[in-house]
Amino acid sequence: MKKRNLFYFFMILPSLLGILVFYCIPFFLSASYTLINNMAEKKFVGLENFRNMITDELFLRAVRNTFSFILLSVPISMLLSLLLAMALFEMKKGRSISCIFLFFPIIVPSGTIVYFWKILFDVNGVVNKWLSESGLPVGNLGHGKFAMAVIILLFLWKNISYNIVLFWSGLNWIPQIYYQQYELEGASAYRMFRDITLVFLSPTSFTVLLMSIVNSFKVFKEIYQLYGAYPTPDIYMLQHYMNNQFSALNMQKLCTAAYLLFLFVSIVLLIIFYLQKKLTDTYQ
């Protein structure tokens, strides 16, 4: 048994070394940058960078936009993913072709996605053409008050298929005997969904929640390709802020923002894990 564990350890050792060298060590070494005034003088200033950061209007705007995006996109993504997974699970015909269309965004490169969305939402794009032909006002749907909606649609289109796979897997693990028993008792579809589906899908739902939060930060690549490093203030995200600080070699602000983001995300994840454990203990 010990030899087998040793073999498994050596198999994952390259990945562990990669994480250590390229993630963990730089993360902890960068802590020193949060305590200096700039990269030229490198004067120790204590927690001054953190005090300045939480009063920086540009940083606060990026925080508001980022978490507004997460609070809107993640619940919508989870709800749509669950509904589509349940629809696919119940389908008898056409499931294969439906899966192809739903899972297509997973394999599409980011450059293709960006080009497609530019065709749709550019000033002279397809959507504006439809609006014009319908007699509705035409505008730049990638900027102003509609900008966030466009980014949320992009996130949903790109990531919803991955969540469908997770929910579909969870649905397959639910014993059908529970549904049959409820049907014999004359229970409604809503009651079966509430008492069986949601309960058994709770571990999967927490996994989907975590992955959706992680993927919401990854959408920056497409936003950057669409609107550049300095988009409209409505979609200026934390990733824009940190990327621009890196381009300006302002390492003290970059690292301070990164540590504040790490602290907040860690607290959120701890709360999620606590709720998951509490919910699991309740139904055991």
Image (tube, rainbow, N blue to C red):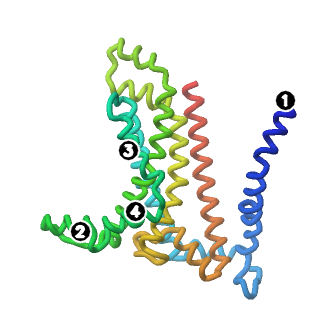
Q: What separation in Å lies between label 3 and label 2 (alpha carbons)?
A: 26 Å
On screen, residue 175 versus residue 153, left or right, reads: right
Kindly identify the amino acid type of the residue bearing the numbered disc 2: Asn
Residue placed most toward the observer, 2 or 200: 2
Q: Which image quadrant for residue 138?
A: bottom left
Q: Estimate the spatial distance between the alpha carbons at disc 1 and disc 3, rounded to whole Å.
A: 44 Å
- Residue most extreme to the right: 3
Marks 1 and 2 sit apart, C-alpha to C-alpha, by 65 Å
Q: Residue visible at 61% across and 70% down?
A: 257
Mark in front: 4 vs 1: 1
Q: Which residue is mark 1?
A: 1
Q: Earlier in the sequence, mark 3 or mark 4?
A: 3
Kindly report which numbered mark, 3 or 2, lies closer to the viewer in this rendering.
2
- Residue 80, which numbered label? 3
Callout in the foreground (2, 4):
2
* Disc 1 to disc 3: CB gap under 8 Å: no
- Mark toward the start of the polypeptide (3 vs 2): 3
Q: Earlier in the sequence, mark 1 or mark 2?
A: 1
**What type is the residue that disc 1 sits on?**
Met
Q: Report the residue at 39% width, 53% height from top.
A: 157
Tell me the CA gap for discs 3 and 4. 16 Å
Above or below for 276 versus 220: above
Mark seen at residue 128: 2
Please name the residue that numbered disc 4 is placed on.
151
Q: Secondary structure at mark 3?
A: helix
Q: Secondary structure at mark 2?
A: helix
